[in-house]
Each structure stands twice: as structure tokens, then as C-alpha cells.
Image: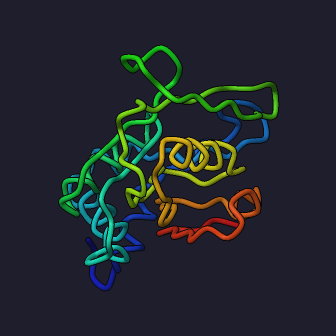
Amino acid sequence: MGPGETDLELIRSRIREVPDFPKKGIAFKDITPLLQDGHAFRKAVDAMAAPFEGRDLETICSAEARGFIFGAALSYRLGIGFAPVRKPGKLPPQTHTVSYSLEYGTDSLEIRQDALAKGEKVLLVDDVLATGGTMEACCRLVETAGGVVVACLFLIELAALGGREKLPGREIVSVLTYD
């Protein structure tokens, strides 16, 4: 970290923007430089964990693939369990499944039926809040499995894409916001 550089400036400096990826017109936020810098990655996990220190949480749920990176690290950091949310066919049966809309079709996510106890307090974690479709599906999936969504946590929020609008009434925490 350079002189006077704050933790958030350090984290932001390690997120690379890749123009026209995965298709023309998209400015992809690449987190791999952040992950390659152990100090910056630790600061990112600490910044994500800070609002939830001492909160009444029991489990973190994250969707594959990049959500696993932050979800598992936060599970360790906060000392609570981790339950993966996966694409269909990746978890042993029995699972709950939720389908959701994408701009070009539909997709589905699953969680094991025994992953959460009734009323279990869950923090949902992902790397990026864009349109909100994946997190909305994760919320529905956790609730179908009997859990209670306490909050939705993101490293990055792409505010212009309006993802918060798909999560009305939910506590949403983002470390970095891009317009």
C-alpha cells in the first residue's frame, strides 16, 4: 500500500476493468488481480466482514463460482458455516431448485435440502451485484430451504444496472460501488 492509500483505494486499485468482455459494450470487473495480491485480498475480506462482526448469523451461502471465493473466506473469518449454492447436478441429492431469468434465457441454482435448519440466519455473499437476478434466486432458494436471509453482501456493486431493485426490503451491503 502506498503512502496515504486507504484500504478501499487498495482494493479498488486491484480490480481491473476489461472492456468488451465477455461481449461488446460490457466493462467487466476482473477480480483476479485482487486475488493474486494476498494483502489486498485480506483487506477485501476484512472490509466485507466488518459490518457483520458480532451479528447473529449462522451460515453463509454463496453461488458458484466467484461467490465461493469470498463466501468461504468470510465463513472462516466470521467463524460460521458455509453452504454452497450450485448449478444443477453438482450437489448430491436431495436438493431444492430455483429457476430464474437471464437476459438471454433462464438458469437454475440448487442447495441441498439439509443445508439449512428452519429459521437458520443466513448471510448471502457474491462478488458482484449487477442485475440482481442471481442474488434474487439465491434469496428464494435459501427461503425455500427454510433459512432466513439476514443480508446480501457484495464486494462490488454496479449501480447503473439496478440490481438493488430486484432485492426490495433486503439489507444490501457493498464494499465498492461503480456507477
The residue lying at 56 percent from left, 68 percent from top is: 172
The residue lying at 53 percent from left, 19 percent from top is: 88
Q: Is residue 107 left or right of residue 74?
A: right
Q: Nearer the viewer, residue 23 or 156?
A: 156
Which quadrant, please, contains the N terminus? bottom left
In the displayed image of the protein, which residue is found farthest to the top? 89
Q: From this view, report whether residue 169 is shown above or below residue 145.
A: below
Q: Is residue 101 left or right of residue 80?
A: right
Question: Where is residue 160 shown, x and y percent of the image?
Answer: 76, 62
Question: Where is residue 103 shown, x and y percent of the image?
Answer: 81, 34
In the displayed image of the protein, which residue is found farthest to the front? 118
Question: Where is residue 62 shown, x and y percent of the image?
Answer: 43, 44
Q: Nearer the viewer, residue 172 or 162?
A: 172
| Number of callouts | 0
The residue lying at 34 percent from left, 71 percent from top is: 47
Q: Nearer the viewer, residue 46 or 4?
A: 46
Question: Where is residue 122 shown, x and y percent of the image?
Answer: 41, 57
Q: From this view, report whether residue 123 is shown above or below residue 138.
A: below
Q: Nearer the viewer, residue 77 or 1?
A: 77
- Is the image coloured rainbow, by chain, by secondary structure, or in one colour? rainbow
The residue lying at 63 percent from left, 65 percent from top is: 178
Location of residue 43 (image quadrant): bottom left
Q: From this view, report whether residue 175 is shown above or below residue 124.
A: below
Location of residue 179 (image quadrant): bottom right
Q: From this view, report whether residue 90 is shown above or below residue 2.
A: above
Q: Is residue 112 left or right of residue 46?
A: right
